[in-house]
Amino acid sequence: MKGYTVKDKISVIVPIYNVEKYLDRCVKSLINQTYKNIEIILVEDGSPDKCPEMCDDYATYDSRIKVVHKENGGLSDARNVGIEISSGSFIAFVDSDDWVEKDFIEELYSNIKRENADISIVGYALIWDSGKEITYGDNNDYLVYNQEDAIKELLKQKKFQCMVCQKMYNREIFSDIKFPYGKIYEDVAVGLPTFLKANKVVFSGKPKYFYYQREDSIVNEKFNENKLFFLDCCKEIIDYSNKHNKIFDKEAYNFYLRALLMLLLQLYSDVRTRNSEICKQLEKEVRKNKKHIFVNPYIDFKKRIALFMILVMFPRRLLYKVWRIKQGE
């Protein structure tokens, strides 16, 4: 991929829909970045609130802001539109209900330039209105990965995960990759393809991105069948590994079993889905992959126990309650 210059432009893509309460915090955190050579692309996705007017006001305030108004097409579609009109050498994504540290872009860019990398990643924190905060990242962590090791780390879900929002990408990575239209967990769908186009990945554990945890967010809402797309993405990763001498077999099955457990716990949480056919089918998938539960080194203790409880058909309602207690909820 092409080299870098000192004054590379960075494109920051912000999809916007029904976030009137949170948008100002997000946009101001981008306007105030210490790295100034950025374009902030606000993709207003047919929002029914005051977001369209707010976006236009931001554009009059800062010439670096570009606004796109479009019919509602969902998060993936908005991101794809933002990529199409972007002009930066690198691309970053920020969701409109989140915010970032003032040196978010500078940290990502300085690392990508220093290592001549194709993807740069930073740590992050989850923030709730209650004041609860969980930080993922260590200020002392600084790691550089080749492609294979980066993919393995991605699937282990330890240092970093599939979310695109705390990453910066060489724009050439997205030359032929698009987010899947109309799908949720779209980040998972592009996780492996983007890393397969990266020769080198750099990770800094400094938490520079803040995910606001909304009860009504797509990921936090109760189970619906659209979430099964997550498992389709996991199976594609396993298939890829199998076709390439099982190069990251253990990591891929760790990723898949974690996804199964997450979806099953969502099903168990609701009396209407606890005994559904979908629930039974996912439990069957756990049993089919039981050997990986016991021998996979990347499945942590709590998840291993929960998966074992599914294997022995521990009562679903009680399993969910035990899990909540273990999580401190």
Image (cartoon, helix red, strand yellow):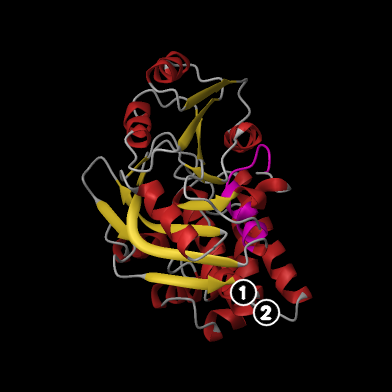
| Rendered location of residue 52, percent (x, y) | 48, 16
Which is nearer the eye, 144 or 235?
144
Q: Nearer the viewer, residue 214 or 35?
A: 35
Residue 138 magenta: no
* Residue at the disc numbered 2: 247
Magenta span covers which residues? 180-195
Q: How far apart in space, not on screen, are marks 1 and 2 (Cα)?
A: 8 Å
Q: Position of residue 275 (x, y in %)?
A: 56, 54
The location of residue 257, given as percent across then percent down, is 56, 68
Q: Secondary structure at mark 1?
A: helix
Query: Is label 1 in contact with label 2 (beta carbons under 8 Å)?
Result: yes
| Residue 254 visible in rendering | no
Identify the image quadrant of the N terminus: bottom right
Question: Which mark is on residue 148?
Answer: 1
Which of the 4 image quarters holds residue 207?
Answer: bottom left
Above or below for 260 versus 270: below
